[in-house]
Image: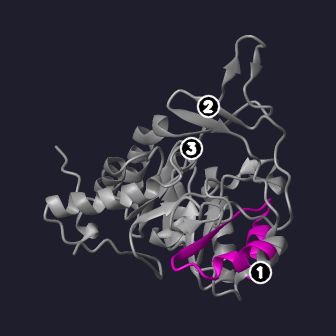
C-alpha cells in the first residue's frame, strides 16, 4: 500500500489532493459527479462577514490555456453559510477548510471567530488578495506588514489550522510568506490568480465587465511552480501548490518542487471528477517508482 496521507498543520489529510476555493461551490455541489469523501479535503468558496453580490456580469471569460474571472467574492456571508450550507457538510468524511476574506483586519478575525465553535470546520484558508478599505484598496497580500497583521488577528481568533493563500502579484513572494509564518500561519497555499486582461476586438471592450481579472488554468503552471519552489525553500511550514493542475503529472511536479499538497482549481470546471483521476495517478506513479510514502517526493528536485 502507498501512503498518500499528509499533514497540514493539525490536519491529517488522507491524500494530498484538495479542491481550490471558488471552484467547488460551498462543498456539496459536486457530489453528483464524484465521491467527495475520496478527496484529501475541500476548500469552500470565500466567505465574508456580510453577504456579497460580487462584480457585474460578465465576470468569467475563457482564454487560451486558461480563464479570466472577476467574481468579486460573491457569497452568502458567514451567518447564512453557517445556517444554510454548513449542515450539508456535516456528513462528509474528509477535511473541510473555509476560505475567509475581509475588507479590514478586524473583519477577518470576526469571520473566523464565528466559525470557532463548529467542529465541522477543520481549518481556514486566509485569502489576503482582498483590498483593504482602510488602506485605500491596497491588497493585504502585497504588503508584509499588512499580511502579518491579518494573520496575527486570525491566529488570535482560532486554534484551528490556518493556511494563508498568497498572491503572485508581488515583487518578492518570499517576504510575504515569511511574514505570514512569523504571524502564526500553519501552512501556505500558492498561487492565487495572476492579474490579466482580455479584449473583444469587435467591441474594443474588455471581456470582463470590471476590466482586469484573475488568470488561472494551465497557462500559469510554470509561474506557480517557480513560486512554490521559492517559498518552500524560504519557510519551514507546509506549502500547498495551486495553479494549472489538470493531471497527476502536474501534481507530481508540484510535490517535487516542494509542495506537501496541491489544490485543483480551474480543472474542476472542465472535468468535475478529474480530481479522482489525479489521486489515482499519483498512487500509480508512486507504486511504479517504489515510493512508499508520498512525502518522499516533496522537495526532491535535483538541481544542477
Residue at numbered disc 1: 114
Residue at the (53%, 76%) spot, across then down: 95
Give the secondary structure at mark 1. helix
Check if mark 3's residue and mark 2's residue have beta carbons within 8 Å. Answer: no
Q: Of 280 and 237, which appears nearest the observer?
A: 280
Q: Is residue 225 left or right of residue 11?
A: left
How many residues crowd around disc 2 within 10 Å: few (fewer than 14), some, or many (20 or more)? some
Q: Earlier in the sequence, mark 2 or mark 1?
A: 2
Residue at the (82%, 66%) spot, across then down: 77
State which quadrant residue 235 falls in. bottom left
Q: Of 167 and 15, which appears nearest the observer?
A: 15
Q: Earlier in the sequence, mark 3 or mark 2?
A: 2
Residue at numbered disc 3: 170
Residue sitting farthest toward the top: 202
Residue at numbered disc 2: 62
Label at residue 106: none
Select label 3 or label 2 by which is in front. Answer: 2
Q: Earlier in the sequence, mark 3 or mark 1?
A: 1
Residue at the (55%, 58%) spot, across then down: 33
Task: Name above or below for residue 216 compared with residue 40.
Answer: above
Give the secondary structure at mark 2. strand
Q: Is residue 220 left or right of residue 192?
A: left
Task: Using the rendered image of the protein, determine whether residue 112 is visible from the camera's viewpoint.
Answer: no
Check if mark 2's residue and mark 1's residue have beta carbons within 8 Å. Answer: no
User: What quarter of the picture does the C terminus occupy?
Assistant: top left
Q: Of 198 and 9, which appears nearest the observer?
A: 198
State which quadrant residue 122 falls in. bottom right
Select label 3 or label 1 by which is in front. Answer: 1
Amino acid at each position: 500500500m502507498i501512503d498518500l496521507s499528509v499533514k497540514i498543520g493539525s490536519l491529517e489529510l488522507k491524500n494530498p489532493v484538495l479542491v481550490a476555493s471558488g471552484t467547488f461551490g460551498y462543498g456539496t455541489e459536486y457530489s453528483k459527479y464524484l465521491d467527495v469523501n475520496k478527496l484529501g479535503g475541500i476548500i469552500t468558496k470565500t466567505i465574508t462577514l456580510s453577504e456579497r453580490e460580487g462584480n457585474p456580469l460578465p465576470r468569467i471569460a475563457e482564454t487560451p490555456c486558461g480563464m479570466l474571472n472577476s467574481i468579486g467574492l460573491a457569497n452568502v456571508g458567514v451567518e447564512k453559510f453557517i445556517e444554510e450550507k454548513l449542515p450539508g457538510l456535516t456528513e462528509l468524511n474528509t477535511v473541510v477548510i473555509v476560505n475567509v476574506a475581509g475588507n479590514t483586519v478586524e473583519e477577518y478575525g470576526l469571520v473566523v471567530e464565528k466559525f470557532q465553535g463548529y467542529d465541522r470546520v477543520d481549518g481556514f484558508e486566509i485569502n489576503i488578495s482582498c483590498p483593504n478599505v482602510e488602506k485605500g484598496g491596497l491588497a493585504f497580500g502585497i504588503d508584509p506588514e499588512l499580511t502579518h497583521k491579518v494573520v496575527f488577528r486570525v491566529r488570535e481568533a482560532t486554534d484551528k489550522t490556518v493556511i494563508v493563500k498568497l498572491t503572485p502579484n508581488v515583487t518578492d513572494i518570499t517576504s510575504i510568506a515569511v511574514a505570514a509564518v512569523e504571524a502564526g500561519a500553519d501552512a501556505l497555499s500558492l498561487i492565487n490568480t495572476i492579474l490579466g486582461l482580455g479584449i473583444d476586438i469587435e467591441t474594443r471592450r474588455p471581456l470582463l465587465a470590471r476590466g482586469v481579472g484573475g488568470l488561472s488554468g494551465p497557462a500559469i503552471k510554470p509561474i506557480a511552480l517557480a513560486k512554490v519552489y521559492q517559498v518552500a525553500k524560504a519557510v519551514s511550514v507546509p506549502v500547498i501548490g495551486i495553479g494549472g493542475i489538470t493531471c497527476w503529472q502536474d501534481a507530481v511536479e508540484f510535490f517535487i518542487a516542494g509542495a506537501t499538497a496541491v489544490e485543483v482549481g480551474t480543472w474542476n470546471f472542465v472535468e468535475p471528477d478529474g480530481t479522482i483521476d489525479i489521486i489515482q495517478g499519483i498512487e500509480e506513479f508512486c507504486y511504479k517508482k517504489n515510493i512508499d510514502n508520498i512525502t518522499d517526493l516533496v522537495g526532491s528536485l535535483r538541481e544542477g
